[in-house]
Image (cartoon, grey):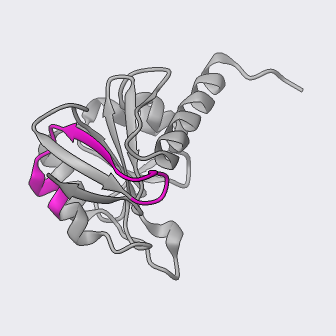
Amino acid sequence: MLAPDLQETEDNATFEALMWALSRPGEVRILPEPGFPGIGQALADLETPVWSDDAGLTPVLERCGAKPAAIGQADLLFAGTAAGSASAAAQARMDSALYPDEGATLIAAAALAGPTRLRLTGPGIETAHEIATDLPAVFWRTRNRRIAYPAGFDLFLVEGRRVLGLPRSTMIEVL
């Protein structure tokens, strides 16, 4: 058996950090490398339609074989700006009870401290967990209006090497 190379090891570590982040909403995990490129390499492949407002990410996604898609048709949405995050939250593809695998995953650049305080409840959270971010309250109201578990989209907030996962099952209250 061949030993994994450095890239495969980093991709696996990135994938593991993302899965732990979703299983424990509101708890920060550490990525092997900062920003979107490692996440793109870990999640995108030949069958993944992607949308990104980050032009620097395009070459990474193309190397993975991912195909560019319209915002409402993408499986993965990479939003590097507040405007991109707002558009993605409003237009992300939703799944349904019949097809739970069709919901998008939004990966948004966001400070994991900021003026918008949130209370998280739901699966993976013992009672409640509070976080703060720089994404505005309108972003969270849009997300909450669109999520009707099990239908919805999953969300990762990324700040450098730090990532926080918020699955569609997480209820989010703006404080």
Q: Specify whether residue 63 is in view.
A: no
- Is residue 172 placed above or below 43 in the rendered structure? below
Residue at the spot 9% in from the left edge and 37% down from the top edge: 115
- Is residue 63 placed above or below 130 in the rendered structure? above
Q: In which quarter of the image is residue 19?
A: top right
Q: Position of residue 105 (x, y in %)?
A: 40, 54
The residue range painted magenta reads: 122-141
Nearest to the observer: residue 66 or residue 91? 91
Q: State left or right for residue 3 relative to residue 27.
A: right
Q: Specify whether residue 172 is in view.
A: yes
Q: Position of residue 30 (x, y in %)?
A: 45, 25
- Name the residue at the front extreme: 127
Q: State left or right for residue 75 relative to residue 135.
A: right
Q: State left or right for residue 32 relative to residue 89.
A: right
Q: State left or right for residue 45 relative to residue 114.
A: right
In reply to whether residue 28 is colored magenta, the answer given is no
Residue at the spot 56% in from the left edge and 37% down from the top edge: 15
The quadrant the N terminus occupies is top right
In reply to whether residue 129 is colored magenta, the answer given is yes
Residue at the spot 47% in from the left edge and 47% down from the top edge: 22
- Name the residue at the right extreme: 1
Q: Position of residue 124 (x, y in %)?
A: 49, 52
Q: Where is residue 165 in the image (x, y as percent from the top left)?
A: 40, 44
Nearest to the observer: residue 172 or residue 141? 172
- Name the residue at the bottom extreme: 98
- Is residue 156 placed above or below 161 in the rendered structure? below
Q: What is the number of callouts on the image?
A: 0
Nearest to the observer: residue 38 or residue 31? 31
Q: In which quarter of the image is residue 16?
A: top right
